[in-house]
Amino acid sequence: MWLLVVVLLLILLYQWGRYMSKKSLARFGDVNLLRALTDGVSKQKPRMKFVLQVVALVCLIVAGARPQFGSKLQNVKKEGIEVMVCLDISNSMLAEDIAPNRLEKSKRMLSRLLDQMENNQVGLVVFAGDAVVQLPITNDYVSAKMFLESISPENISVQGTAIGAAINLAVRSFTPREESSKAIILITDAENHEDDASGAAAAAFEKGIPTHVIGVGSTQGTVIPDGSGRKNSPRKDSTGNPITTRLDEAIARQVAESGHGIYAHADNSNSAINAVIESLNQMQTTELESHVYAEYDDQFIWFVLLAFICMAIDIVLVDRANPMFSKIKLFE
């Protein structure tokens, strides 16, 4: 829209040009006498042509700004499943035994999952020592990715690994539609879990909801960075010793087995999330109905059309006066 300044400059330049033209014409003699000698030349058509050119230019600028309006609420029915993701955001997920660290790797896997969801609905539960719903179940993948980017261990002040609480919260966060297929994806290092995670997964499966588990991290263990950004600067306990963390693969496998889901170990490839996506694709889809706002309707085409009409008139409009309309003083 800043290009409209150019239109203003063109108008000022046009007015300056007319002034200079009249000034130059006055050097040859009386202006009224000279006009009588050029009676066949229209005095108004050049102005009309300039107005048409300006209107066409303004319309093209407005069209380039892509005006939109006309959004409305509509019902969208799609075939898919419901998926709740439980993401571990405890401090141990900052360990860098998988590039760039466990949490960032988990975010990238979830982003890839969202790209593959198509007609499914997804929600997000984050947990550490407690569990909260970060994103209610939705098919708005753009918003889901935005929420995903803002996740950090600071989202939950209570540290720990409450896997059971996260699974129970995920079960309660599904829609009440009994006919729809549902699944839980748990992404965690399974370390220092504080509740009956296997029992929660088994209880979820009793309601027809399997729990798939992706284990993040190495089983050998590594230190947890202190968040200062300095290299080789680990967190330390009260005695001054570095805090280490490792993937408890036995617990992760046990939760997956109790939840009748699959277990996959995340590495620097996408094999883990691909295995989970394949399992989700094998589930029976049902009709999902959701209320979403339709995208705004583009209206630039009308401005383009008006611009072409103005340019077409400008092309066929000649500077000479038309004898048929010489007696009509429309502009006087």
Image: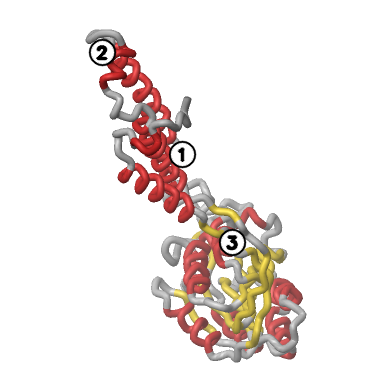
Left or right: 15 in relation to 74: left
Q: Position of residue 282 (x, y in %)?
A: 54, 91
Quarter of image, res 87: bottom right
Asked if residue 160 shows in the view, the reply is: no
Residue at 42%, 51% in the rendered image:
304
Residue 325, above or below 159: above
Residue at 42%, 64% in the rendered image:
99
Q: Position of residue 225 (x, y in %)?
A: 50, 54
Residue marked by disc 3: 143
Disc on the earlier residue, 1 or 3: 1
Residue type of the residue flagged with mark 3: Ser
Residue type of the residue flagged with mark 1: Met
Secondary structure of the residue carrying numbered label 1: loop
Residue marked by disc 1: 1
The Cα atoms of the two marked residues, 2 and 1, are separated by 36 Å
Residue at 30%, 19% in the rendered image:
36
Which of the pair 59/179 is nearer the observer? 59
Residue 80, above or below 58: below
Asked if residue 57 shows in the view, the reply is: yes
Work out which residue is located at the far left of the displayed protein and give it.
Answer: 28
Which of the pair 300/237 is nearer the observer? 300
Mark 3 or 2, closer to the camera: 2
The Cα atoms of the two marked residues, 1 and 3, are separated by 28 Å
Quarter of image, res 47: top left
Q: Position of residue 205 (x, y in %)?
A: 70, 88
Residue type of the residue flagged with mark 2: Ser
Q: Position of residue 78 (x, y in %)?
A: 61, 80
Disc marking residue 24 = 2
Mark 1 or 3, closer to the camera: 1
